[in-house]
Amino acid sequence: MEKDKNQVAILGGPTVRREPFPERRCIGSDERNAVLEVLDSQVLSDFIASPGKYFNGGRVVKKFESIWSEKYNFKHAISVNSWTSGLMSIVGAIGIEPGDEVICSPYTMSASATCVLFYGGIPVFADIEEDTYCIDPKSIEAKITKRTKAIIVVHLFGGTADMDQIMNIADKNNIIVVEDAAQAPGVLYNGKPVGTIGHIGGFSLNYHKHIHSGEGGLIITNDDNLALRCRMIRNHGENYADAHPELPINNTIGGNYRFSELHAAIAIEQFKKLPDILRRRNNLARHLSSRLSGISGIKTPKVRKNCTHAWYLFPLQYEEKDVGISRALFVDSVNAELPKPKTVEDVALTQGYVRPLYKSRVYQEKIAIGTKGFPFNINSNISYSYSDNLCPVTEKMYSKKLLLTGLVRDPLTIKDIDDLADAIIKVIRNSHNIGKNIIDNYSNKVVSTVDVASKT
């Protein structure tokens, strides 16, 4: 018996698409040849942890740093072996001390806040803007105290935070601004590249990012002092301090956060591809927005005026009362219309992104280092609270509203995006029938992007 073509797949109807989405393959002959050249040189890393010619790495590392800084007019570019170690270097460089407060976003990767804990600083979470998912200047201002030393701004999903307002607040209160632009390479805010609109920032070169070297990161700044301190922290800076007693840097100890020549060779070739990657992602994102614009129950993303977007992920907002089924059931219904994913990058639709960071055990139990409550007990006259509803917009996005797709990526085409849009529209048009035939036990279920990644 032929299936009713209008029936949704979750109720036994035909799927919108059966063919798997094209696999993301971003390493080619250029990267392979560059790696072979480094292998043939016999020099896989050229760092030495003492002052001199090799303190800042080898030829390929320096070449990678220079091409990024020259392209976007950053005075200093400092490669590291991950963006996590980049953030840790930055927090050390700006001088966070035990008991200092740093305002952070609660809706981001955990390292954007735990980097503060490594130095005994205390993350204070400000809420996000509802339309951009980036940290809200109004919430920042409300969280400032005399102990506030810095703000870590995350340009989430490839969009931009409101840097004009944030810098105004920071300047007024003598606060350092760090830009976590891990998901936003090449993005412009009012014509300025993100990363050094604040005092210091940087990007991720993790495998899932726009360009990658497997793992890696890049710190950028126009501040000579911060650049020196980051280079020291990257490479056992205590040895550099011993050789330069004239400099006030004796407290800048370091680790081994160094980038290898092999990783740099890959990153150079990847960086050349960034403009085309951004152009193609923007074309796919514009098309998906166009297809879903005006669809009841779905709100398409907003791009901040006079800014560009990198579309690391494509965010949508879901309105359960308009569609008539829970968000979790909606996501399952859309995914049923499309091929089973082979990797996390093939998943058509997820919900919630990450759980608000302050809900994790480190904040709930207020024990980060040791067993006695450090650093949350440093300011003995203050009881830091990470209670439910601390950041209402974040919690609403996580538990009720946010949908995400990562399919606005290479090598997908407009036809692939049409299949995704068709699946979403088909489910919305048949939502009443889904709700009538499926007992919706999904109401309080959130399977976040991270959960999906762990199970794919």
Image (cartoon, rainbow, N blue to C red):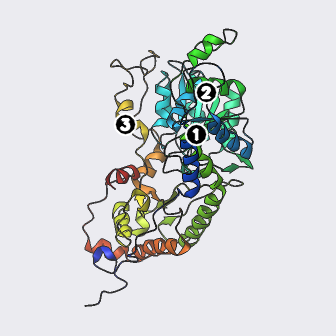
The C terminus appears in which quarter of the rendering?
A: bottom left
Q: Quadrant of residue 328?
A: bottom left
Going from N to C along the chain, the mark reached first, 3 or 1, is: 1
Q: In the displayed structure, does residue 68 sit left or right of residue 111? A: right
What residue is rendered at 49% in x and 66% in y? 298
Image disc number at residue 41: 1
| Mark 1 residue type | Ser
Residue 178, x across and y down, in percent: 61, 34
Instruction: Kindly state the secondary structure of the residue where label 1 is placed.
Output: helix
Which quadrant would residue 59 be assigned to in this image?
top right
* Mark closest to the chain's N terminus, 1 or 2: 1
Report which quarter residue 67 is drawn in: top right
Q: Do the residues labelled 3 and 1 touch (CB within 8 Å)?
A: no
Relative to 103, say whether 185 is above or below.
Answer: below
Residue corresponding to mark 2: 230
Specify the label residue 360 is tagged with. 3
Q: Nearer the viewer, mark 3 or mark 2?
A: 2
- Say which of marks 1 and 2 sits in front: 1
* Residue sticking out furthest to the bottom: 1
For badge 3, the amino acid type reads Ser
In the displayed structure, 130 sits above or below 12; it is above
**Dot in front, 3 or 1:** 1
Give me the residue at 48% from left, 40% from top: 106
Q: Which amino acid does label 2 sit on?
A: Cys
Name the residue: 48% across, 21% down.
Answer: 120
